[in-house]
Amino acid sequence: MNESEEAARLHWTPTDPHGFVVSDGAPPVRDDSPPVRDDSPSVRDDSPSVPDDYELPAPVQGAGGPARTASPVPALGAPAHSGPKAPSYPPVPQGLPAVTGDLAAAVLPDIVLDGAAYPGLSVRAASVRGDSHRYAGEPRQDALCVTRIGGDEQGGELLMLAVADGVGSAPRSHVGSNEACRLAARYLDHSTSLHESIRTGDAERFQRTADAVVRQIGNLLGDLALQHSERPDAFATTLRILLVPLDPRIRTRGFLAVGDGGTALLRRGYWHLDVVGDADGDQDSDVIDTRTAALPRARSAVTRLLHAHAGDVLVLGTDGLSSPLAGDSGMRDFLAAAWNGDEVPAPADFLWQFQYRVKSYDDDRTAVVLWEHGEAQ
C-alpha cells in the first residue's frame, strides 16, 4: 500500500506534491483551481492533517504564546553593592574579544558556574570576568576546576577544587590559568601517594607530591610557550588547590598553592581570612596570603594540611575576591549572612551573591566554596 492509499484508508486528505487531491478510495483527480494564498507557517507535504472530528487539547500555557501568570516571575536583579552608590561599570557582560585576534580568548565564557555534592560536602564555584576586562573587551584570565581524582577499587577518591589567576601583564595568561587547572587534575589523578598522605596527615610526603606536580605543570606550560614561540612568562598564572577526601570519616584536607590569592574560612559566623597561616586567626583580620611566585617558572608549592569541622565554609579564591573580602566589611557581612550554616544556596542564588560589588575592585573574580556538613550527613 502506497502513501496515498494509506492516507485514504485512515480518512486523511493530504495534498499530493504533484497537485492531486486524495479522497477516500477515489482515483486521483487533477486539481487545476487557482492556488489560495496562505500565510500560515509551512509544513511538510507528507504531514497528516487533523481529522474533522478530532478535538484539539487545551493549549499549554506559554507553549504557543505569551505566558499568563498570576504573579510576575521573580528576578534577583543587579548584584548588591557596598556603599550608597554602585560601581560605575555595568554589572553585566560587555564587549567580547575577537576570534581573529585570539581564538582562545574569544571562546572563553564571561561567566562560569559549577558545583558538586557528596555525603557531608557541598560545593559551589564561580568565575566572573572583571568589570575592566568587560569594558575593554578582554578575556577573563581566571580559571576554576571542580573535579574528582584518584581512587581505585578500594576507594581513596578525592575532590579537587582549584582556582587559577592569570597574571594581568602576561598576554597568554588566560591560556595558562586554564591549562594549569587541567594539568593539575591530570597529574594529581596519577599520584599514588596523595590520598594516603592526606589520610595519615603526612605533611612531608604531601609536600613532596605537591612539588613534583608543580614541576610537571611548569615544564609543560613552558613547552606550550615554546610551541607558540612565546616566552614562558606569557602564560604566567597562580594556582590554588584544595584536595578533599570523599570518605566523610576523613576530616583532613590538603592545600597547595603557587602565588597569590586567598583561602578564607567562615566558621560560626566569623571570617578567618588567612587559614594558610592560622586557621584560628582573629575575626575580620585584614591579613591575606600573598606571594609573588607564578607558574610556569615556579618549581615548588606552599602546602598545608587543614582539619575541617562540621559547619565550616572554606573559600578558595583569586585576589579578585580575597582583596575586597579583606578590605570591605560590607562584603564580609553580606557573604557571611549568605553562606553561613548548612543552607547551601542554589546555583543561581550563589552566583548573584558572589557578584557582590565593591567600588574600585574591578578584577576577575573566581572562587570555589566548600560547605562541610559533617560525617552525620
Image (cartoon, rainbow, N blue to C red):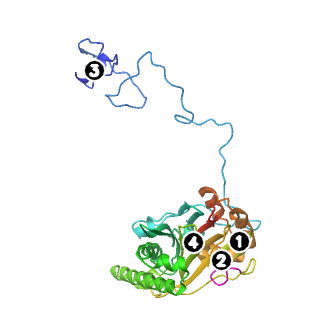
Question: What quarter of the picture does the N terminus occupy?
Answer: top left
Q: CA distance from mark 1 to mark 3?
A: 72 Å
Q: CA distance from mark 4 to mark 2?
A: 31 Å
Q: Which residues are magenta?
A: 274-280
SS state under label 3:
helix
Lower position in the chain sequence, tag 1 or tag 3 = 3
Q: Residues within 10 Å of mark 2 (few under 14, many from 20)?
A: many
Lower position in the chain sequence, tag 4 or tag 2 = 4
State whether the magenta stretch is mostly helix, strand or loop.
loop
Q: Residues within 10 Å of mark 1 (few under 14, many from 20)?
A: many
The answer to whether residue 19 is visible is no
Looking at the image, which is closer to me, 327 or 336? 336
Residue wearing tag 4: 250
221 vs 50: above or below = below
Lower position in the chain sequence, tag 2 or tag 1 = 1
Task: Check disc 3 and give the amino acid type.
Answer: Glu
Residue at 42% of width from left, 83% of height from top? 218
Lower position in the chain sequence, tag 3 or tag 2 = 3
Lower position in the chain sequence, tag 4 or tag 3 = 3
82 in the magenta segment: no
Q: CA distance from mark 1 to mark 4?
A: 19 Å
Q: CA distance from mark 2 to mark 1?
A: 19 Å
Percent position of residue 83, x then y: 76, 68
Residue wearing tag 3: 6
Of marks 2 and 1, the one in the foreground = 1
Percent position of residue 369, x then y: 60, 67
Give yes or no for contact between labels 4 and 2 (Cβ–Cβ under 8 Å): no
The answer to whether residue 26 is visible is yes
SS state under label 4:
loop
Give yes or no for contact between labels 2 and 1 (Cβ–Cβ under 8 Å): no
